[in-house]
Image (cartoon, grey):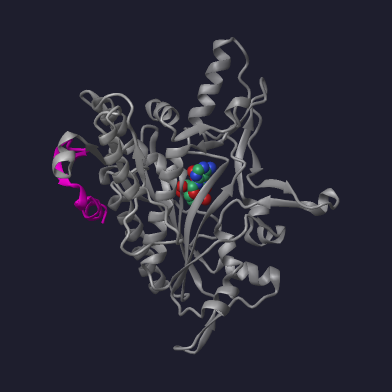
Amino acid sequence: MDKIVSLAKRRGFIYPGSEIYGGLSGTWDYGPLGAELKFNFKQQWWEYMVLRRENVFGINASILMSPKVWEASGHTASFTDPLVECKTCHERIRADFDEEIRAHGEGHKAKKEKVDWTEPRKFNLLVEARLGAVEESKSTVYLRGEITQGVHVNFKNILDSMHPKIPFGVAQIGKAFRNEITPGNFTYRLREFEQMELQYYVRPEEKAAAEVFEFWKEERMKWYIGLGLNKDRLRFREHAPDERAHYARSAWDIEYETPFGWKEAEGIHNRGNWDLSQHAKFSGEDLSYFDPEVKDRFIPWVIETSCGVERPLLYFLLDAYHEEEGRVVLKLHPRLAPYKVAVFPLLANKPQLVEKARQIYQLFKAPSSLPGRRAGKFQVQVMWDDRGNIGKRYYSQDEIGTPWCVTVDFQTLEDETVTVRDRDSMKQERVAAKDLESYFAERLQ
Ligand code: ATP
């Protein structure tokens, strides 16, 4: 873990939040490489969960919502974790984090100080904010503690504007905030983080819902494995009944084996009709669905898949990190790698090589004048490097996970071929410059 934290900072993936002011606990900033990685990660999720499906719609709801939302969803009353306070130094720690409590106590013991804790009490995780120029009590809002509710409060809007046929899903990616008592383990437990969620509405029938639940469980596991996460470090775990959220009819986690134990990557929950019926009750709106085929009206059940961005991304980084003889290599899946290709002139002081290499770099880099995809034009995240010698550049690219390096050398000037070097096998082959687009397109499929 220490190696990942240090690499992440040194190579521009992840920096401590507000670092020059001494930091802000539970926040991290994504640097140039981290931002690309995060972008790719979210894009992979969106493509898999939304774009390739006929019956899943994406939305983008506000972070700030009416405080009534959180009353209806139960968050104001019960979005809590147990907290204990050290009577000696007043540090607060999550009461169920045995490891942290033990370490804290030992710190005091070593200084021959008393170890004494308050009784556990419930601590609400919602982050408060003030909005507008009205008096304090009227202006209190919450930064959303989960992105889920942004979907459910729009259920009626989705029905009226998209006319979906059940079963259908509504997906969202966005920020959530939690006043975590004990943030830590790098980006594992944050106070500000992103989530990627699907709320999938089904008929309120036990058997059908169980089948859909199984389908999404498998789909989600496939997604992690498809993006290269070691399947021996992944498992499902069913929540014990006393562990489940108050609304959950069933709950499973996908877990990853980290250096600090098996930990949750995402949760798959059957939320029943909890959210929609609560919002119907609190808002007075009719949030039922009319099934034109069966001709009945009901409040649908919801199967939810809920994962973070930063937390599972940390697992991908841990999984990708390899030390091999003479190099450190991040074996990230090419679709996740911050840069797909690095382009080098063999020698930085030979203008002919530089010019030719720039042409290839521009070919991938060329800014598009049209938003979205442009048919027939292949663009990828590409990096230019002309520092040091070729060995150092390979080392540097391996460490950030760039799958392919393209070198323009003297032979290029004669026969228009370049050297392509593969990150994992370290093999090099000659490829005609004109075939580079199809060469990479094929490998990125
Ligand atoms: P935990 O038990 O670890 O506190 P949770 O069960 O409360 O997590 P959920 O509410 O199910 O988490 O959130 C869904 C996903 O959002 C988690 O699987 C995780 O990937 C991510 N997530 C939740 N809380 C945090 C956090 N504080 N920091 C980073 N990611 C988080």
Q: Residue 428's quadrant in the figure?
A: top left
| Residue in front for this viewpoint, 327 or 430 | 430
The image shows residue 259 at horizontal and vertical percentages of 36, 32
- Viewer-proximal residue, 210 or 54? 54
Image height of 323 relative to 287, above or below: above
How far across and down, in percent of the image, does residue 135 sit? 86, 50
- Judge whether 7 appears above or below 155 on screen: above
The quadrant of the rendering that contains the N terminus is top left
In magenta segment, residue 335: no
Q: How many marks?
A: 0
Q: Is residue 257 visible?
A: no
Q: For the magenta stretch, what is the residue range? A: 419-445
Please say whether residue 367 is visible from this viewpoint. yes
Residue 430 highlighted magenta (yes or no)? yes
x and y percent of residue 295 in the render? 49, 90
Q: Residue at x 41, y 70 (%)?
A: 209
Residue 211 % position (x, y)? 35, 69
- Work out whether 237 lies above or below 273: above
Q: Work out which quarter of the rendered image holds the C terminus and state it.
A: bottom left
| Relative to 425, 372 lies left or right | right
Tell me which corner region of the image, top left, top right, bottom left or bottom right, holds residue 257: top left
- Residue lying furthest right: 135
415 sits to left or right of 103:
left
Residue 267, relative to residue 282: is it above or below? above
Q: Is residue 233 left or right of residue 203?
A: left
